Amino acid sequence: MRQSRFFAVPVLAFSVIAFPIGLRAAGDETKSAKGTVTAMTGSSVTVKVGAKDMVFNVDDKTEVIAAGAGTKARQAQQKGMPGPKLADVVKTGQAVRVSYHDMSGNLHAATIQAIASAGSSGGTTSDEKEAAAAKHASGTVKSVSGSSLVVTGAGKDWTFTVDGKTNVIGKGLGTKGAPSGGKLTITEAVGAGDKVTVTYHDMGSSMHAATVRVTAKAAK
């Protein structure tokens, strides 16, 4: 199905803000969110993204991409209107992807695109995806337990959560075997003073260690 583009109806007023040369305007970075439309007004659209609601401001600069938009645009022009209303093309319950700019807490929708589904989680944001991306930290183990690992590196302590999904790798660890037989626990494989590199995911309230690579064991 062919998709057409149109500009949403303009908001009653807007202001122009000048920024000094060499300074980057707040909100210049384009972010994205995927979710389901739950409400609309003449100047905003509310999208449920996962478990939270996000309210985006819309105006004559907001571009909407959806099936049938071209037809709606022509009908609006025939009536002497600059374009169709957002509600003429996007309906509540519609899954959308919104590209937006965060203007000091005010989220301006640059593009609203109708999509087939928000996904099994109900949607996500580019910030959440970035936070979930794998990161790395290296240092010396300060302490380790069955649920956490503290690593000192780059002049600070890093505390990681560990669980059954945390993979520990290193020379000899795969064949050493746990004292009780089977897979080594993290406390059996890693000790204070070991040099490690941790691959982790920032979960917002915690940092989960996906992989702990032992690069050097502590001197005995």
Image: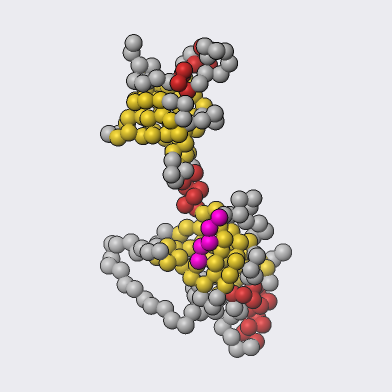
Q: Quadrant of the C terminus?
A: top left
Q: Position of residue 32 (x, y in %)?
A: 51, 58
Relative to residue 24, is residue 206 depicted above or below? above
**Residue 54 is covered by the magenta coloring:** yes
Q: Position of residue 29 (x, y in %)?
A: 42, 59
Residue 72: quarter of image? bottom right
Q: Position of residue 75 (x, y in %)?
A: 66, 82
Residue 27: quarter of image? bottom left
Q: Quadrant of the N terminus?
A: bottom right
Q: Residue at x 51, y 62 (%)?
A: 54
Q: Residue at x 50, y 66 (%)?
A: 55
Q: Residue at x 33, y 13 (%)?
A: 219
Relative to residue 179, is residue 4 drawn left or right? Answer: right
What secondary structure is the magenta-colored segment mainly?
Answer: strand
Q: Please tell me which residue lies in front, 164 or 174.
A: 164
Q: Please tell me which residue lies in front, 2 or 47.
A: 47
Please give the range of residues in magenta: 51-55
Q: Residue at x 50, y 32 (%)?
A: 210
Relative to residue 137, is residue 70 depicted above or below? below
**Residue 75 is covered by the magenta coloring:** no
Residue 106: quarter of image? bottom left
